Image: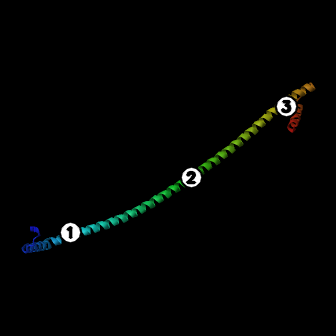
């Protein structure tokens, strides 16, 4: 049988004594610092987890607030756009009303100008007709008319022309 498989009682006793001394030294000097280190590490991990959870809650809260602010900003933009559209429609409506008023004013001015030019043309036409009537009357009668005759004939002729 090989040597490493043989049972030796002395070796077992010395191994037990060495292990007991080693366990006593470890228990006396290293056990407490190892236990404190493990507890410190456990505490650090627990603190890190709670800090991460708090940071996560804070991040979720900031995300919620950001979404609310974005929603509010979107609503404000929509309100501004609605208000701008209403103002633009109001400006267009006022411009159309002003243009219509100016058009009506120009039409009225043009109508008055046409009336004035018509009246001027009628006056010129009456004067021309009066001159022609006087000339034709002088030729028919063969003599020159005085102011009263002339006036009476012209007024009668103009009145006849106005009726027609």
Tell which residue pokes out farthest to the front in this image. Answer: 1
Q: CA distance from mark 2 to mark 3?
A: 66 Å
Q: Nearer the viewer, mark 1 or mark 2?
A: 1
Instruction: State how far apart marks 3 and 1 are (Cα).
Output: 135 Å
Q: Secondary structure at mark 3?
A: helix
Image spot of residue 143 (x, y percent)? 91, 25
Q: Is the C-beta separation of discs 1 and 2 under 8 Å? A: no
Q: Which residue is mark 1?
A: 37
Q: Please tell me how many numbered marks the rendered image carries.
A: 3
Q: Is residue 74 left or right of residue 3?
A: right
Please name the residue that numbered disc 3 is placed on.
Answer: 130
- Answer with mark 1 or mark 2, whichever residue precedes in sequence: 1
Residue lying furthest right in this view? 141
Q: Quadrant of the C terminus?
A: top right
The residue that label 2 is drawn on is: 85
Between tags 3 and 1, which lies in front? 1
Q: Quadrant of the N terminus?
A: bottom left
Image check: 119 left or right of 40? Answer: right
Most foreground residue, 105 or 82? 82
The numbered mark, 3 or 1, whose residue comes first in the sequence reads: 1
Can residue 33 be seen by looking at this rendering?
yes
**In which quadrant of the rendered view does residue 61 lie?**
bottom left
Helix, strand or loop for disc 1 = helix
């Amino acid at each position: 049988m090989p040597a490493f498989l043989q049972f030796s009682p002395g070796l077992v006793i010395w191994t037990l004594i060495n292990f007991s001394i080693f366990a006593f030294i470890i228990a006396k000097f290293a056990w407490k610092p190892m236990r404190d280190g493990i507890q410190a590490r456990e505490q650090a991990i627990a603190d890190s987890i709670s800090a991460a959870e708090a940071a996560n809650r804070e991040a979720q809260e900031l995300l919620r607030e950001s979404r609310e602010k974005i929603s509010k900003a979107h609503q404000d933009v929509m309100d501004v756009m609605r208000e701008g559209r209403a103002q633009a429609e109001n400006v267009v409506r006022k411009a159309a009303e002003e243009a219509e008023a100016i058009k009506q004013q120009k039409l009225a001015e043009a109508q008055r100008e046409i009336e004035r030019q018509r009246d001027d043309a009628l006056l010129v036409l009456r004067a021309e007709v009066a001159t022609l009537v006087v000339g034709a009357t002088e030729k028919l009668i063969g003599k020159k008319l005085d102011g009263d005759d002339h006036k009476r004939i012209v007024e009668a002729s103009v009145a006849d022309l106005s009726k027609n």
